[in-house]
Structure formats: C-alpha cells, structure tokens
Image: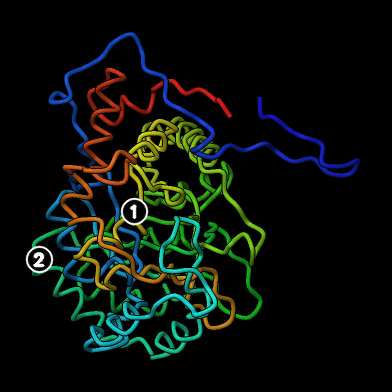
Amino acid sequence: MRDVVEIGLGKTAQRGYHLDDIAIVPSRRTRDVDDVSTAWQLDAYPFGIPCVGHPSDATMSPASAVRLGQLGGLGVLNVEGLWTRYENPAKVLAELASLGADATGPSPRPTRAGGTGLHHTRRLQEVYAEPIRADLIAERVRELRAGGQTVAVRVSPQHTLALAPVILDAGVDILVIQGTIVSAEHVSTTDEPLNLKEFIADLDLPVVVGGCTDYKTALHLMRTGAAGVIVGIGGDDWSTTESVLGIRVPMATAIADAAAARRDYLDETGGRYVHLIADGDIRTSGDIAKALGCGADAVMLGEPLSLCPEAPAGGAWWHSAASHPALPRGAFEAAGEPAGSMERLLYGPADEPDGQLNLFGGLRRAMAKCGYRDLKEFQKVGLVLDR
C-alpha cells in the first residue's frame, strides 16, 4: 500500500524514494560474472548493454552516437540541436567547451554539486536561436547511417508534427519523442496538439516516448503503442527543473510505478511488453543496478558521457532544456578533466573506487553477486529501504 503523508489538514502527499534511498539485497545464490549477460533488445534492435545516450549536444554528435553504438549502446541525436542548425557546429561547440566557470563562482567541477556556469545560459540561448534546417537533418541521419549502427533521433513533442516528415524521409530506425514531461493527451486551444496514439499508429518503426513520472501517465503512454517509455526527467545536479517548475522525481518510486503499469498493460494486451528507460540520477554503476532492479530495462546516460574524449563539447555539459529561449531549466557546467575514453567509462578498467568508471562491468558484477544471469531476471532482485 502506498505510504501517504498528511502535509496539512487539507492536503496529503505520497511518499517517494530516490535511488540513493534503496539498496540491492543479494539472494542465496551467486553466479560467475562471465555467465552474466547485459544484452538488451528494443523491438528488432539488439544491444550489448542497456545504455541509451542522452540526446544532449554535449554528449551526442553523429560520431559519438556511432561510437556508443559500436560499444553496444544506443546513441540518440537531437534533431533540434546544434547539428541541425549549423553546417559545421564544431566552432560553436569548441567555444562552449572553452567557457570557464564564472569569475564569481567556484572553479570548474569542484564537486558534483558545484553548480558552475550558471551565467552562460544566455550564450546557450543565442547559439540555439539559429533555425533548424531540414537539409541538415537529412545529412546527419546519413552520417549516422554510414556508421553502420542503429539510427535513433530525438524530437520534442511540440515539433514532432512539423519535423516528422523530414525525419521519416531520412530513414531512421528508432524515433524518440522526448520532453520534460510528455502525456498521451496534450490539451491546447491555440495549436493542433500531437495525438500520440494516432501518430504512432501511422508509423512503421518503434517509437520511444517520455518522460513520465507516475503510474497513470506511464500506462497511458504505453496505450499509445510506444515501444518504450522514458521514466524521469533527466534530473541531476545541473537540472533546475525543481527550482523552475517545482517538479522533482524520486526515481526509485517512479520506475517501480512504471513497472507496475507495464505489468498491468501486459495483462491488458495479452503480452505486449513495453521497455522502460530510466532517465535521471544515474551516475554510477550502482545507480544503474538499482534502476534496473526497480524495473527499468535500460538507463539513459548524460553527464557521465560528457566527460569522455569522444564527447563533442570537450567535457562541458548541459541539458537540452538549458537553452530554452524563455524558460531554461538547466545549468551550464564548465568542462572538467576527462574521465577516460567511452570504452573505459562503459567497460573499464577503473582506477577509482567510486563506481563512475566501468559502469557496465559494475552492473555485471552486481548481477553476478545476486545470482542473476540476464537483465529480465535481475528485475526481480530484492531491495531494502535503509535511509
């Protein structure tokens, strides 16, 4: 039964838990780590690890998306980002990478919660003011296709109807419709709203939608025919969604609620399985393991990927919503020291004991310690609330 707390005489609130509030409980059986599989499959597309690249220009270029695909994950390019606004965005990205911390602020990345670069938002807004070019969307998809990996792109719900014809003509494999919050029923008296169910029904490719934060929204998104649902709003130390909108997502509870919606939808449809992708508070291999233990099928990595040399912004990090022209919801983080190659980030070896390198090697070992051989089984792992 859901824990409900009385805030005052006229209001109650549901208690939610973050990934930091829970821990994994090993069972009586252990397993050899070499017998553990981290393979994951979304629709017809198999992946070696349950990793989706967050579609920020700080992490995903055509080259880095292809590289993530070569390493077993899924790279997702933002078709509303710099790569579709500038023929050669390298100069813009180099400028952003060179932006240091503000003179009044602390040095770049002193801690994970350092919060540097808050006053570079205006420059982000300026570079994203360039219009999106249809010819560049087609060109970037061709570059992704030439890399020989699964081609996935992200578009926001408000621009889906306008950009979908160009995206579909370019020939993508997976379409990601992602906003801070996405619902199956958007109401508008000024613009024609996107009807996700009708839109997805007309497509012949898998669609991933999100984010969502609760059971009802997850269930409604599944009923649109989506192949995957993003759970969470990409919250991390540089997201300001709580400050701007008052929205904060306890990821452990959000994932578990979405997993319950998936179970009910599975019964409702007689067996249609919808994948859950956790997006938010994913920093370490332990976070990945706990997110999957709560019921996620994969995780979306953002800031950790920004510290790889393959990242296009040279170590700087910002969310897609950080450049919003009217209401930015994310701080710019100045570039820090590279953490290691993308391969080292994902597969090791690690030379620090904090879980921020060898992310999926850590996941494999967590699964082995608990006796599970694949990701689907690992969703049944025991959890304990200890904070």
Q: Amino acid at mark 1?
A: Leu
Residue at coordinates 91% horizontally, 40% vertically from top-left? 9
Answer left or right for 357 relative to 333. Answer: left
The coloring applied to the image is rainbow
- Foreground pick, 123 / 340: 340
Q: Which residue is mark 2?
A: 147
Question: In the rendered image, which quarter contains the C terminus?
Answer: top right
In-image side of 145 versus 369 (left or right):
left
Q: Quadrant of the N terminus?
A: top right
Q: Residues within 10 Å of mark 1 (few under 14, many from 20)?
A: many
Figure quadrant of residue 107: bottom left
Q: Is residue 360 left or right of residue 251?
A: left
For the point 17% across and 57% down, the residue is 341
User: Of label 2 and label 1, which has the lower sequence position?
Assistant: 2
Front residue of 171 and 33: 33
Residue 301: assigned label: 1
Amino acid carrying label 2: it is Gly
Q: Which mark is residue 106?
A: none
Numbered disc 2: secondary structure: loop
Q: Is residue 287 above or below residue 80?
A: above
Which residue in the rendered view is the most extreme toward the top?
A: 28
